[in-house]
Amino acid sequence: MAHAKEAEIFNRDESKVNWHDKALWFVRNKRDKAGSNVKGWEELRNLASAIKANVLSNLDNYLVQFEENAKKNGVHVHWAANAEEHNKIVHSILSKHKVEKVVKSKSMLTEECHLNPYLEANGIEVVDTDLGERIVQLAKEPPSHIVLPAIHKTKEEVDVLFQEHLNTKPSNGDPQYLTSEARKHLREKFLKADAAITGVNFAVADTGGVVVCTNEGNADMGTHLAKVHIACMGMEKIIPQEKHLGVFLRLLARSATGQLITTYSSHFNKPAPGTEMHIVIVDNGRTKQLSRDDFRASLHCIRCGACMNTCPIYRRSGGHSYKTTIPGPIGSILSPGIDLKKNSSLPFASTLCGSCSDVCPVKINIHEQLYQWRQIITKEVKQPVVKKSVLKITGRVLANSKMYGFMGKSARFMLKHMPRFMIYSKLNAWGKARELPKVKDGNFDEWYKKRQKNE
Amino acid sequence: MVILMSGIKKDKKMSSRDSILKAVKNNKPELLPLPEIDLDVFNEDINLLETFIKSVELVGGRAKVLNSISDLDNEIKALYPNAKQIVSSVKESDFGTVSISKDTDPHSLETIDLAIIQGEFGVAENGAVWISENDFSIRVLPFITNDLILVISKDAICLHLHDAYKLISKRERTFGLFVAGPSKTADIEQCLVIGAHGAVSLTVMVV
């Protein structure tokens, strides 16, 4: 289903949409404030962008360097060409250790690879331990935002969910109570887990270490209690040197939630004595995206979610309307590269206002790439006849000033004199769920000429 | 379309590692330079201690400035009068009641009320304190403890993360982290709740 249709579903509950819109805009404002308090913020973004561009232009060498250094530290390194191979590798590590229970901290990559259902089908219990992810896991839904996975859920919905699954008492959605119950529930899971899976925020080529950032401490509770730690990473997570973490960690939390830094920024270099650490490096379409000159920069992404929080479409359509692992503006330039036909409506789910590019900490030209995808999609994917012919006619009208003037006049006449049921009919999409503006006499051109005459 | 077709053509005989690296080599753009970080852009002449304390509070923690390390135990006693199971890895503190070593089972720390850990330095811009495995023996300790106290010297505060990474560049790399405030979440309707999975409070003692 096209994005616009999916968005309609989310828009059925108007008060929820309004809340969602405001909540995310609030986060966007916090991001602005956090950024403006940093001396040299724009230079920081330039640096991050240039470092990422260097990484992509030398990625094979950095990957080899990273592998070499990680192995020296006693870490096992695996390579997966696609999601299927990634899942098999993770499962084989778990099988070797006869693992029955796994705790997992946030990793968009494992979502992308659909790791949970794969492991569950093989008889392994997987518990997502980030609170937001646990909520959507219990609700059997995917995350709707990469940083705020349950942003589409009200506290009352969480209350009902926890009553059912955690035997909590009705609390009218008291966040303090619900969080403390989740803490107890997940504490049990941490203590009993045989293995922990985490994502990777940054992988450092010159040390072979990985950095994992959380606010809740769930990644660390999992990894330091279990015997086996598996860190799964997309290959673009590489940065050249440890000092570059200074640049990226200053940007990440400020851009994501307006925090100065996440509570925990954990640097894993060597496994603890008596434990094993594995890193799985995953391609799954990334090398393909690397080959595309116009879209390569989408691989700079550090998954902060700032483009979602600022996007007027995302805020009012919800993450689930995108039907992809990564929703929002960044998802809409990544997903067509994975499946052009299935995701062909996503680059159109944008006003091209450019706000996403303005807030991106690594300066991805998101709105330009959305535009570029549109050029490809209209050529490669069959467009609806109505859209095609309307755009053709519009093109002719806009190219001819006389015709444009006539059409404007007719439209104003009709809006003024036609009965309401005809204006707000199925034929006029602009009249759907909104009042059209009151018609003024004359157009801009006439007004401007009159004004000049009077001067 | 060329851009849509050129991906990995996986050679059956080649390992995924080699096929990925080969594809990257073929698909990457021409080498672009790695930029230098010019610290002049980020440096500021500000009071490090004051900024640090403000940042610690902003990230949900509490900072206490002590005149002398000998005040440490009295201060802790005043803040946590009910703590019973206490691990201290700060040699100036006699407050510890549970001793741990490299051989301690991390699961046994589940009942710890309070951990007192020596931090290496603080970061003024974000209130983070760097601690490394050498300072606390068992990796899970600063997370599994109910409350956490970090002790740093008031001379060990740097301006920003760029300086912080200079300070840890020569360390023995096993496990280490920046801790900024207590564990927290806002995953239920964006309401900030302190105390998610890690320590529910953080106090930084600046001596």
Image (cartoon, coloured by chain):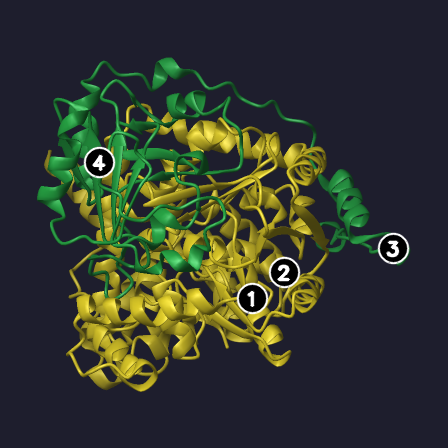
Chain colours: A yellow, B green
Question: Does the CB distance between marks 1 and 4 fall below 8 Å?
Answer: no
Tags 1 and 2 touching, CB below 8 Å: yes
Disc number placed over residue B11 in the picture, else none: 3
User: Which mark is drawn over residue B204?
Assistant: 4
Callout 2 secondary element? helix
* Residue A329 drawn at (x, y percent): 44, 54
Q: Amino acid at mark 3?
A: Asp
Labels in figure, total: 4
Observer-side mark, 4 or 3, equals 4
Q: Amino acid at mark 2?
A: Ile
Quadrant in which the C terminus of chain A appears: top left
The residue under label 2 is A338
State how far apart marks 1 and 4 are (Cα): 49 Å
Up the image or down, A121 lies above or below A207; here it is below
Mark 3 Cα-neighbour bin, 10 Å: few <14, some 14–19, many ≥20: few
Q: Nearer the viewer, residue B13 or B153?
A: B153
How many neighbours does mark 1 have within 10 angstroms: few (below 14), some (14-19), or many (20 or more)? many
Mark 1 residue type: Asn
Residue B87 in sight here: yes
Distance, label 2 to label 4, CA atoms, is 47 Å
- The numbered mark at residue A343 is 1
